[in-house]
């Protein structure tokens, strides 16, 4: 029993936030392969499709109420708040998105902006604390063309750096229409290998 408990506590908690509205598209394939790799190393993987969450508002309202509370929680009670709680509990946070106009999908961006509640700023003291510090942030993305992945990646790199998170990414340009990524040689192996490394 003791051994079982120890083994369980060693398994990494991985949360995947998928920002694609397509359930069988290219993002879904990357998520599937990442999950396979992570599960093969015994990680606990949970997937949230941000496109199918219900939000009270389509983003952060900038009410700043979260900054006046001790808890790292958004005061708006909707599905985003549930996702944020799971982010706080995870060790690895994977954000998977199609490239939409050289950026992340709006469906994923809603959650990213609501991450404001996972930080506490003390502007007078010039300090910032966050429950995200020390976690790993992973960006998985695909695009039709090979222009714009650097633009997509930049805010994730800056956020990870600002937050004290380890950052990794797997960016697949020229992936084509939804589903075509499955015909691209080596992508499944690369995605699985990244997951195995982080799990
Ligand atoms: C609204 C929208 C915007 C897009 N913008 C871009 C873009 O700026 N650059 C690009 O290469 N592909 C763009 N694409 C194509 C997708 O990024 C690409 O097909 C992606 O692999 C689709 O992933 P999915 O199957 O998970 O939806 C766009 C697609 C849509 C629907």
Image: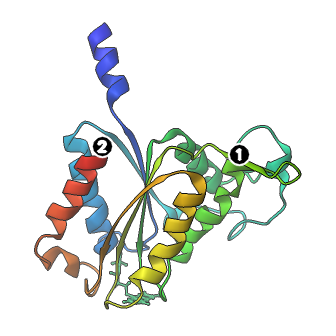
View quadrant of ligand 1: bottom left
Query: Element at badge 1?
Result: loop
Please report whichever mark, 1 or 2, sits nearer to the chain's N-terminal start. 1
Dividing the picture into quarters, in which one does residue 79 lie?
A: bottom right
- Residue name at image x 79 percent, y 37 percent: 70
Disc 2 target residue: 199
Comparing 54 with 99, the one in front is 99
Name the element at disc 2: loop
Disc 1 beta carbon < 8 A from ligand 1?
Answer: no
Q: Quadrant of the N terminus?
A: top left
User: Which numbered tag is attached to residue 146?
Assistant: none
| View extreme (right): residue | 124
| Residue found at the far left of this picture | 185
Q: Residue furthest top?
A: 1
Between 37 and 59, the one nearer to me in the picture: 37
Residue at position x 19%, y 42% from top?
40
Q: Which residue is mark 1?
A: 73
Report, in whole angstroms, how far the alpha carbon at label 1 lies from the one at label 2. Answer: 26 Å
Quadrant containing the C terminus is: top left
Q: Is residue 99 visible?
A: no
Q: Report the side of 134 relative to 24 (left or right).
A: right
At label 1, counting other C-alpha atoms closer than 10 Å, the crowd grade (few under 14, some 14-19, many 20 or more) is: many
Q: Is residue 5 visible?
A: yes
Residue 37 position within the rendered picture, expressed as x and y whole percent measured from the top left: 21, 50
User: Where in the figure is residue 12, as x and y percent of width and height?
Assistant: 36, 37
């Amino acid at each position: 029993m003791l051994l079982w408990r120890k083994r369980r506590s060693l398994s990494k908690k991985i949360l995947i936030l998928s920002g694609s509205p397509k359930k069988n598209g290219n993002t879904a394939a990357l998520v599937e392969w990442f999950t396979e790799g992570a599960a093969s190393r015994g990680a606990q993987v949970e997937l949230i499709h941000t496109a199918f969450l219900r939000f009270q508002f389509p983003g952060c309202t900038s009410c700043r109420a979260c900054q006046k509370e001790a808890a790292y929680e958004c005061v708006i009670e909707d599905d985003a708040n549930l996702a944020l709680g799971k982010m706080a509990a995870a060790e690895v946070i994977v954000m998977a998105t199609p490239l939409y106009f050289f950026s992340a999908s709006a469906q994923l961006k809603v959650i990213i902006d609501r991450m404001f509640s996972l930080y506490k700023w003390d502007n007078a003291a010039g300090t910032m604390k966050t429950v995200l510090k020390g976690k790993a942030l992973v960006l998985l993305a695909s695009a039709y063309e090979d222009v714009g992945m650097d633009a997509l990646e930049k805010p994730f790199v800056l956020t990870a750096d600002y937050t004290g998170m380890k950052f990794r990414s797997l960016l697949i340009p020229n992936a084509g229409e939804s589903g075509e990524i499955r015909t691209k040689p080596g992508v499944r192996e690369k995605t699985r290998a990244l997951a195995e490394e982080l799990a």
